[in-house]
Every structure is written in structure tokens, then in C-alpha cells.
Amino acid sequence: MSDAGRAALVSMPWNNVHRPSIQIGTLRAVAEAEGWEVVSDYAYLSFYALAGRMLGLSPDDWAAAYTRVAEGLYHLSVGDWVYARRAAGDAERAAYYTLLRERGITEREIALVDALRAVADRHVVETAEGLLRAAPQVIGFTTTFSQNGPTLAVAERLRAQGYTGTIVLGGSNCEGPMGRTLLAKFPAVDAVVDGPGEDAFVALLRQVAAGGPLAATGRLVVRGQDAASTSRALPARRTTAQLVVPRPNYDGFFEQLREVGLRALEPDITLPVEFSRGCWWGAKTHCTFCGLNGATMEFRSKHPDSVAEELHHLMDRYGVLDFFAVDNILDLGYLETALPRVEQMRTDHSLFFEVKANMDWAQIRAIRRAGVRSVQPGIESLSTEGLRALKKGATAMQNVRFLLGCAEFGVLPVWNILTGYPGETPASLLSQLNLVASLTHLEPPDADILAVHFDRFSPYVERPGSFGLTLSRPFPGYRFAYPGLSDEELWDIAYHFEGDFHDDARNEELRHRLAARVRLWKAHRHTARFTYRLGFSSVVLDEQRPGLPAGQTVLTGDEARLFRALIGGTRFRDLQARHWSGTRWESTLELLHAWQRRRWVFIEGAKVIALAVRHRPSAYRTPPAQSTPRRARTQTPVVLETPTVRG
């Protein structure tokens, strides 16, 4: 044992089993730098292996079931309930299962939930026994999403077995009143970390090593202090341009993966990396529904030189080539600094980043050449009106252009359409219904459509009245996962809330139609196509989209030149400044309208973009030139035709 002591870091279910916890990996590096010996317990791996044996499901069926509980049933607190109420009696279980049935959960899924209680009970015992054998002075749990129930179950078991060391919780479930409620209502917990944990964990380790009582400092909140004193302990917000965090140590993940017999998962492992914190867009304009960055919104990123170095180290040490950036948003400065250095590595790695959808095609090409193969662009809507209501700072044109750019350069966009929010109008839904039929050759949304959640720290929850919103209650699953809490305490521990607002009576039927159209999109995604091939003086269009005429069209002459000019998007004034000015503009505009009716182009205001994509995507193709910068000009009224929307 080291001179400083021994600490254990634990991540319970329901984390992704193909991904180590970056919180454990980072805090292990932090604690080792302080001279502590660290035991890393990726307890979700041991649970995954244990359940696979106890439930008797095939590997594929259990993988699907685990994902269903972790992600699909998260909003009903199933993952928390399985652990927190694993000894629930018949009446309590019947009441909870009634809620699940009311929310459309099948009897087969309910049987799975019921069977998982026995697995959870055994896992709690085994996890606590393993930690007791390790005899750490400090046990730190990271808790996010559905990890409260599992975490508290093990903490309480440890206390029942006589553990007298320090138990501290950190992670997004501990931010603000959520962490203070955990501390106040669950005596097994000694301290929580409200926000970024590195400095707070170091402070706690030093206090334990010194042998003195725990004291609040920075973001470390300890038992025995009221809310006012702990809130005063938080540091004042400060602006720092650079994020200084050690690269994570994932040794324990791979050791445990092999120990519990899950080596078959290794080919699909993705390593989390972190290059920035906060959100530069949210610091400017906070998206109405976003509850991320409760502790701090200020954006700061790692030094650009460290990005390639960290990826190089992780590839060499673990033999993994796939990486998942946990950043809320890509630092656009990296496009000229960090990412060119990553590209120069000449490795066949893949990266995932969250990005803003107003990136131009040259930027999409740049990230793809650096190995960014998938992104979450935060599209959220294909209606400019809806995007304004959500304060996304984007337009439908920008979102369509982004999807086209991803198809052009071989980047997978993971995105969704949000609906059911205050201020949504039938016009917004109708415009999306119309547009979706033009995009079926592009990557569809991940889900059919998603209802907006009202999440803690989001403007919807922080200022509901400004949106005509009344928060009614926490999501109903919290009541079952925490039956001992009062109504007020449930409000304090919850992250998701239900709310009431005026919703146009026409919206519900339109949402059903939009969801059906997205389902059709997804069903035909792998057969639909609308591509172009460029000749010297021609453009060949090949079209096969559901509900539209199929076939090949060869454009020549002025039509070919015009279509070329629309690739990547342009403005009417830029067309007029080139070959289509004066008396030619009227006929050109008629042709654009005709192409719009054929769904070859998308027109919004005075902007237009071709909807076909290159026959073969390539990150090494030169992107089209950007439109001219915005400038003052005489307004010319333009009346555009909108195709009729049919069911």
C-alpha cells in the first residue's frame, strides 16, 4: 500500500458495457498523482456478466435487454428501481408494474424487470464484499442517469457490513439540490461533489490522509452543513481558457473485462476521451431544453497539442482505435490546431464528437479527414420556426446542408426531431412533414420523433413561466424508486419533470403523421438514393426515393451549370452575380421552383441547395466554394411555392 492510502472508485450499472467510465479513469489518474493506490471497480461489467449467467438469455438477447433497461426504460426509473426496491413486496411491485403497463411496457419486459431484482440483490452483496476485501479508506462512486439506485444499495450494504471509511458520490446526479438531497436522506454517504470532481476529490483525499474530519471546500459538500453554507462553499465562477485534466487510466476496465469473462466484447470497445467542458453556444444562448452543464457553462478546452498525444497514448496502451468524445460541443478552434495534427497520425481510428449543425462543408470535410466518423449535431428540428423556439441558433437550411455534407464526406450524423415543446405550431410540423419526403436518401433520425423533456438546469425548468409552462411533478418513476422521500424531496432529487402548457389542438395529429413519415424514411433508408455524378459539361442524377419518380436524368448546358452551382448551397444574389442575372433570372427562378416541386432542391427564403449527394463520398474531395458574405442589399420580395402536404 502507498504512503497516502488506498481508494476505490466504483461505477455501477447501467453504464455502457462497451465503454469504460471516464470518471473512474480520470479520478484514478488524479488519485495516483497524489500518491494513492487505486482500485478501479467497473461494477457494471460484473453485473453484466452475472446477469448473463443468471437470466439464461442468449448473448444477443441479454445485450438488447441491458440496453433497453439502461436507455429505453430510463425515463421510468427502471434501472434505479431494480436495485433500490429489489426486496419490494407484492403490492409495491404490482403498483409499479401498473405504471409500466400504462406507459406501454410489454409483459415480457416487465418479467425481465422482475427477474433483474434477484440479479441486483446478488450483485450488491458481491460488489460490497469485493470492496471490503480491498479495504480502502475512501470509496468514490460516480453516479449519472440510473446509477443512484445501484450506488446507494452498495453504499448501504457496506455500512451494514461495518465499513467505517469515507463514502463520496460524484457525477451529474450530485449537482445542485440533487446531491444535497442524496447527502441529507441517505446516511451511508459522507460527502458529495457538486460539479467537476478533480479538485474536490484531491481535497477529500488530503483531508482523509491528514486524519481530520471532513470539511466542505470548493465543490466538496459534506454532511452536517445546511444548504446555505454548502452553496457558499462553491467557488466563484471564473473564466479559464484551458482545461487541465489528466488523461484517463483505463487499466482496471480491461483487467476486469477479462476477469469476469467478457473478452468477447473487446472488438466493440470505444474509449471515452474528453477535450473540453462546458458549451460555447450555451454560454451565448442556452437551448431551452438543455439541462447539461448545471455546475458551469463556461467553455474551456485542452491544449491542442494534447489531443493527438492522448489519442496516440490510448491507442498504444489499449489497442483500441475507436473513441467517443464526451465533450458537449467541439471546440471549433481545433479545426485549425488539434485536428490537423490528429490527421497527420495517419491511423485508422474513429472519433465521435458532438457538434453544432451550422458547420460548413469544408469544416465537415476537415473533421472527417481527422478521423471523425460520427457526430451528434443537435439538429432537433427541420423547421426554422421550431429551431427559433428551441433557441438552437440554426435554420432548417443549415440543418439540411449539414446532413448533405455528412453524406458527401462520409460522416454519420446521429440526430433526432424534438416535438411537444411550448410554442410549437402546426406550421412548424407541416413544414417538416413536407421536407422529410425530400430527404429519404439521407441519414434518418435515430428515433421516430422525441418528446421534449423538461430537465433540471434547463431554461424550461429554471424559468418555466417565460415559456408559458407550469411544471406539474417529477417523472412518476421517481416516486417508486424513492418511496421514502417526501414530495418536496422528490422535487429536489429529480432531474426530469412533467409540465403543462398550451398546445395547439392540431399538433397531436400532425405529430403522428410526422412520426409515420420518419418511420417510412427509416424503412427505406438503405434502398433510397438521390445522387449526382459530374461530367465535363453535364450532371447525371440518379433517383430512387419512396413516393417519387425513379430514374436517371442527364442535365446539360445551363441546367447542368445551375445544378452545379447549387451543390453545397448558395444564395439567390450569388446566382444573380454569376450567370443568371437580369432578364435570365425570371426563367432561372421558374426552373428552381420546378426543381423544388421535383424535390431536387430545397429553398428557404433566398437560399437554395441541391438535395442530391455525390455518387461516392470522399473526405479528400474539394468542397464547393462558400457563398459571399452577408451584405446590405435591396430587399426583393420572393414568393416560393410550397408543395402540398399529403398524409
Image (cartoon, rainbow, N blue to C red):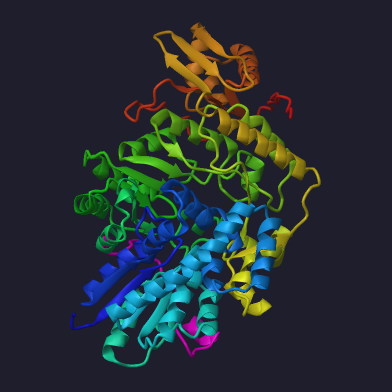
Look at the image and tell me in which quarter the C terminus lies.
top right
Q: Is 302 situated above or below 442?
A: below
Main SS of residues in magenta: loop
Task: Indicate the position of residue 371 as horizontal and vertical percent values.
Answer: 31, 40
In this image, 637 relative to 535: left or right? right
Whether residue 229 appears in magenta in the rendering, the answer is yes
The residue positioned 72% from the left and 50% from the top of the image is 423
The residue positioned 64% from the left and 68% from the top of the image is 93
Task: Indicate the position of residue 600 as horizontal and vertical percent values.
Answer: 57, 20
Look at the image and tell me in which quarter the N terminus lies.
bottom left
Q: Is 106 situated above or below 548?
A: below
In this image, 428 relative to 273: left or right? right
The residue positioned 56% from the left and 16% from the top of the image is 581
- Viewer-nearest residue: 121 or 154: 121
Which stretch appears magenta? 221-250
Q: In the rendered image, which quarter is residue 598 located in?
A: top right
Whether residue 196 appears in magenta in the rendering, the answer is no
The reply to whether residue 605 is in sight is no
Residue extending farthest to the bottom is: 212
- Viewer-nearest residue: 491 or 96: 96
- Viewer-nearest residue: 133 or 410: 133
Q: Is 257 situated above or below 213?
A: above
